[in-house]
Amino acid sequence: MNIKPTESELEILQVIWNKGQCTVRDVHEVLTATKDAGYTTTLKLMQIMHDKGMVERDTTSKTHLYKALFTQEQAQSNALDKILSTVFKGSTSNLVIQALGQHRASADEIDAIKNYLKQFDNK
């Protein structure tokens, strides 16, 4: 699946990922809390996302429920691949060093990173 969501589509996906499944109205209410978004625009974007295969729509009741088919992990992987190849010219170490240098990682996060890296020591 080679889906590349737009920024607006990612905002909608964030809402759906958080709620599990929801109506257009549910998504619209969350979006309008932080930005000016028209209901019909939200509806149209969600219809487009359905056509692209990002979400599925349950039409068995009057109010359609949407559920994400494109996962948060897929979105993170796509974004990371793009950033790694364009901004860091493929250098994983530069990406990690920049990320850790710019943002204070918690002790738990550092431990998780160390544990992850240990698996490469055994190869």
Image (spheres, grey):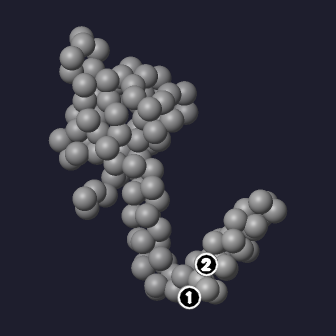
Q: Is mark 1 in CB contact (under 8 Å) with mark 2? A: yes
Q: Nearer the viewer, residue 42 or 71?
A: 71
Quarter location, residue 12: top left
Farthest left residue in view: 51
Quarter of the figure with residue 119: bottom right
Q: What is the tally of numbered marks visible in this picture?
A: 2
Label 1 element class: loop
Quadrant housing residue 8 = top left
Residue 107 higher or lower than 101, as above or below? above
Q: Which residue is mark 2?
A: 119
Quarter occupied by the N terminus: bottom left
- Secondary element type, mark 2: helix
Badge 1 local density, few (<14 within 10 Å), some, or many (20+)? few
Measuring from the top left, give residue 73's x and y in whole percent: 45, 55
Q: Residue at x 34, y 48 (%)?
A: 70
Quadrant position of the C terminus in the picture: bottom right
Vertical position of residue 14 compared to residue 123: above or below: above
Q: Can residue 59 be seen from the camera position used here?
A: yes
Look at mark 1 in the image and give the residue it sits on.
Answer: 123
Residue 64 at x, y percent in the picture: 27, 20
